[in-house]
Amino acid sequence: MTSAVQPNFPRSKLSLYLDLIRWNRPIGWLLLLWPSLAALWLAARGFPGWHLLGVFVLGTVLMRSAGCCINDVADREFDRHVKRTTERPITSGLVTVPEALTLGAVLALAAFALVLTTNRTAVLWSFPALAIAIIYPYSKRWFAMPQAVLGVAFSFGIPMAYAAVQGRIPAAAWLLLVGNLFWVLCYDTEYAMVDRDDDLKIGIKTSAITLGRWDVTAIMAFYIVYLAIWFGVSASVAASPILYLAFALAVAQVLWHFMLIRGRTRDGCFRAFNKNHWLSFTLFVGILLSLAFAR
């Protein structure tokens, strides 16, 4: 009895575009979403309203998706040499560069349309936010710690949240951005540790390569700075036993991450990266509940 050979049907453009924007891997926009929502609640000192909540949730998904298009265009030559990325739509030739750039532009314009429904301050700050998102993929060629550039790009939802709520960006928003930048350094260094061998061969600069044998120590130090800054700002607005419990749970997660990455295995480092959004989610829930019960 012979087995039937399954035909290899070509993938639809929709399927390829969804793959390009990582639709089936929401970790990217979750890492962006929770700090932005936490900042939104802190700026409003409670529920910010359905309009702003919708703007920031949808805007986060759209801008993350647009960023994937830009990133994959910039990295298409590098991705051919990395085990994890060889089958990406652009790298494999199934999606062309003009197609990816067009899709990215449409998604970014949709996000900008959402910003236009807020206020002038938020609209003006959306331009540097977009510029940093475009610059990041190219920083890997010349900057020893491109994760720091990503940290600014992935943290810009924080000042945008304050701008949308208050019509200004106070010092607390910039302080939260700095703290969040250190968190991005944590999880994206864990991510870079997965690809370190491949990145060394092709000449990409990453924090995992720059930090070398101090990578795990540095990540733990970055976590401490991140939690300290966020605790200081959050406690000044929403101090409560619930907030303290949330930060205690966050510390426990950091200790778990240390156990995952200390051996520097690909599986352990990728798992630590992939579960990182729970850390910021924990802080967001703590802030939300603290402000809710304070009313």
Image: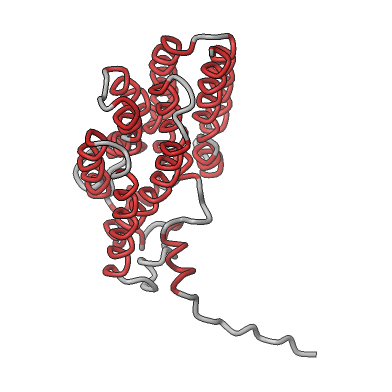
Compare residues 233 and 249 and report the one nearer the observer. 233
Q: Relative to 247, is 54 above or below?
A: below
Q: In terms of image quadrants, where is residue 251?
A: top right
Farthest residue to the right: give it.
Answer: 1
User: x, y percentage for residue 67?
Assistant: 33, 51
Q: Residue at x 19, y 44 (%)?
A: 142
Q: How is the image coloured?
A: secondary structure
Q: Residue at x 32, y 52 (%)?
A: 201
Q: Position of residue 118 (x, y in %)?
A: 31, 38
Q: Is residue 159 above or below residue 90?
A: above
Image point (48%, 75%), residue name: 12
Residue 160, placed above or below residue 217? below
Residue 41 location (% of width, % of height)? 45, 25
> Would residue 171 be found to the left or right of residue 290 on screen?
left
Q: Is residue 131 left or right of residue 284?
A: left
- Image quadrant containing the C terminus: top right
Q: Quadrant of residue 157 in the image?
A: top left
x and y, in percent, of residue 242 in the image: 59, 14
User: How many numbered marks are there?
Assistant: 0
Name, please, the residue furthest toward the bottom: 1
Residue in the foreground of this view, choosing between 291 and 158:
291
Q: Kindly identify the residue that appears in the image at 55 percent across and 25 percent down.
A: 285
Which part of the image, by quadrant, shows the N terminus?
A: bottom right
Seen from the viewer's position, the closer of residues 95 and 83 is 95
Kindly indicate the quadrant of the structure image that contains residue 185.
top left
